[in-house]
Amino acid sequence: MFGGITIIAEVKMRSPFGFISKRSWEEQFKLAEEIGDIVSVHTDSRWGGSLDEIRKVRTRTKKPILAKGIHENDDMIDAAVKAGADYVLVVGRMPEVHHDVVWIEPNSIAQLKTIPDTFKVVWNARDINTGKPKPETFGQARDAWQGWLCQASFIKSINDVEGGANGILVGQGLEEFAKSIDD
């Protein structure tokens, strides 16, 4: 934790928007486990992930694992849980299963307002279709959502953490973020 904020540290090797990690998978995992309260692992191949990655990380850490992906259907959520994920991120929809472990990433503030307050919510500042910043901000999301809210994307240092964040999900900026904690 950093100042009472849960750190979700991602083992991220690439993205469909041009990011390619300069670190090996081992180095990424070691750093994520070192600074994260929760280790995030992609299940979507466009981000270099898979269920095998969840299984691999499960054998190497006792920390909770977030299966990060879009998870378009409930079978994908079930598969991530069976692979060893403690939590599963679902983008843009309300699932029918595993409400106790699902975190929701809404696509808009309007969609955010429809989520039951029993869920944990991740506000991704990045539009996952374009890779560009969303027009709606974390501050607007915090104003619209009173429950547990995680800030995600474009976090490179502790100075990027917004007031009101209960959690932060740090991916491609993980190395820079780790250095900012040490400074």
Image (tube, rainbow, N blue to C red):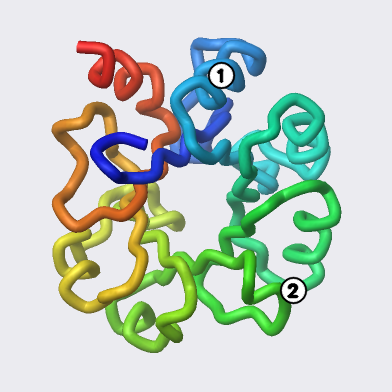
Image point 83% across, 48% down: which residue? 83
User: In the rendered view, would you say 84 is above or below 2?
Assistant: below
The mark that comes first in sequence, 2 or 1, is: 1
Viewer-proximal residue among 128 and 174: 174
Label 2 crowd bin: few (<14), some (14–19), many (20+), radius 10 Å: some
Could you say which quadrant of the image residue 60 lies in?
top right
Image point 22% across, 78% down: which residue? 144
Q: Which mark is residue 74?
A: 2
Q: Are marks 2 and 1 in contact (CB under 8 Å)?
A: no
Q: Type of residue at label 1? A: Gln
Q: Tell me where residue 58 appears, x and y as whole percent.
A: 76, 35
- Callout 1: SS: helix
User: In the rendered view, would you say 61 is above or below 168?
Assistant: above
Q: Type of residue at label 2? A: Asp
Is 171 placed left or right of 12 in the picture?
left
Is 94 placed left or right of 77 in the picture?
left
Write down the residue under mark 1: 28
Image point 82% across, 38% down: which residue? 55
- Whole-angstrom CA distance, mark 2 to mark 1, is 29 Å
Viewer-proximal residue among 61 and 21: 61
- Callout 2: SS: helix
